[in-house]
Amino acid sequence: MPAQPTLATTGQLAGSAPRSALQAALLRTAEACADIWASRLTRVGIVLVAMMVLASLAAPLLTPYSPTTTDLGARLLQPSLSHPLGTDDLGRDVLARLLYGGRATFAIVFGTLVLIVPLGLLVGVTAGFFGGIVDVVLMRLTDIFLAFPRLVLALALVAALGPSLFNAIIAVALTSWPAYARIARAETMTLRRADFISILKVLGASRPRIILFHIVPLCISSVLVRATVDLAGIIIITAGLGFLGLGVQPPYPEWGAMVSEGRRFMQDQWWMATFPGLAVLAVSLGFNLIGDGLRDVMDPRA
Amino acid sequence: MSEAAAAWLRPRRRAGRTAKSLLAFVAALATTLLGLLVATFILGRVIPHDPVVAVIGDNATPEAYAAMRSKLGLDQPLLTQLGIYLDNVAHGDLGISLVTSRPVAEDLRARMPATMELATLATIFGALVGIPAGVLAAARHGRLTDQLVRVAALLGYSVPVFWLGLLFLLVFYLKLDLLPGPGRISVWNQGIVPTVTGSLLVDSLLAGETDVFWDAAAHLVMPVTILGLIAVAYICRMTRGFMLYQLKQEYVLTATVKGAGRLRILWNHAFRNTLVQVVTIVALNSGLALEGAVLTEAVFDWPGIGSYATEALFRADMNGVLGVTLLIGVVFVIINALTDLAYRFLDPRVA
């Protein structure tokens, strides 16, 4: 049972009313962070993800081996002190490939976020703000994308565009944005008739100005929450694409692709496929724990 | 307006509203399906490979190339091509597969039953395990059982199915030899029972071949468990959420005060009120299982549409890939639409 320190923390942090918008935003963030951090499972998730990200960033410091240089004299070695996770069929250190492979995974996740958050916001806010035919057209489009099963659409997209890191990002992004558009639209609809928007209109603010400076900032937090909840799914889809050979291309390492490479050696060299799969599990579990904690804070009902 | 007149008008007005919302529903469904087709059409055009070369090879004469190009309709304007594509799909023509050299539609028809059998059993497995687990977690909200179920569900969500499938194969097939390996049936049992329904379990029983039945059942255990795991996690978590909401309602308190037993309150009162939502979740999940089948089938060499898609993928056979995409997409849309409709029908508050 997660503790509920909201009121206490708010009181301590806020003290008096915030003096600027920035201060208010910081306070709100700090308060939310305190709530999220209060759950033990969420802390586990945050630590798990932070460790994996840091490890893949610091890969050159953590392993002396190159992820791509082959050494046929050191093929399929068992896990040992010099190769903690063993070596693969081309004599490459599995730990090194795992650490560097994390970069591909996180690059795809980051790239996807950079694409889908603005795209989803733009479509959703536009639809919600203007309403009418704009809304109908944009939301139909969103529904069509939502109607596609995500992995299958991503698969078809990468098959069409050709497999590469960049195309994997495009494919995952194209299958992920509709959820954000929906959320942003719902938020905008509640704001559209708000007094401060009417006042802005009277004051002569242009529509793009109202949308960009007044509505979008208010939608960002719910979109970001949703994104955190989604990250685990993005990791899993990415790994699935990699497993099917549609992600990062050899010789560069990627976790899904590493599992697929280890498949042939499953019986005797179990470490080749097992460790990269564990890495995927760890990161996606970490994101799921964080998302779960966020959901608890945002919506106590679920 | 008099009371009587109002009462007389009410059902009519409601009928009119239902008809109108039904019409809107059908229109939405139609646009979504059309959008799906346009999307697969566009995907089929952006490919870097030349579809003409794919059919006739790259040493064809320019004349043969031009002839094939116009035969495939590629010299027409894009909109005309889209028209041709829609017309073909409407006639069940999804093009020729480069892998099997047969019409994609025929291949899919032959392979769909294997996927259906897998996805259906996985969904049933998901419901049988996920619903009780979710109810249990909600009943013991905040206690150890709840936490355990929650962590287990999160693990189920987080695990890459293709990897877990390989581990299962390693442990239960390669090491312990408890279960048969990849495939739908052992080699010696292949082609014994005539295809009636396409489900090997049903067909073997119809033919009275119990050996084949048990063989097929044993082959199903691992893929169904792997594919069902996501369903278990998803159904469990949603059921838990629905139940928590119901258990907070006042009628639960009333029932408790009146002296109803815990089990009775849990199942007869609270769970019954979540049934509509639970059924919805299970139905939506069967669509997801179809999608999950792509990776599961790749791991277990299951001869369904999922492995058909990956085979087509490796051979750059866009017709095959898009055929599966379209098929899964259409099934997905229809399941969602039916669920939506059933939801409105079962729960008048939504309509």
Image (cartoon, rainbow, N blue to C red):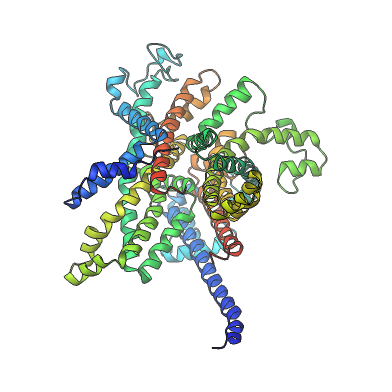
Dividing the picture into quadrants, the one containing residue B126 is top right
Q: State which quarter of the image contains the N terminus of chain B.
A: bottom right
* Residue ID at (31%, 39%): A34
* Residue ID at (32%, 26%): A55
Q: Give how far across and how far down residue A149 sits, in percent.
A: 49, 50
| In this view, B65 is above or below A68 | below
Q: Give how far across and how far down residue B191 sits, in percent.
A: 74, 38
Q: A162 or A11, which lies in front?
A: A11
On the question of residue B103 being in view, the answer is no
| In this view, A215 is above or below B132 | below
Q: Give how far across and how far down residue A260 sits, in percent.
A: 48, 30
* Residue ID at (67%, 27%): B179
Task: Determine whether, in the image, residue B345 is placed left or right of residue A252.
Answer: right
Looking at the image, the residue that sits furthest to the bottom is B1
Task: Determine whether, in the image, residue A147 is placed left or right of residue B229.
Answer: left
Q: B100 or A264, which lies in front?
A: A264
Looking at the image, the residue that sits furthest to the right is B208
Task: Determine whether, in the image, residue A32 is placed left or right of residue B21.
Answer: left
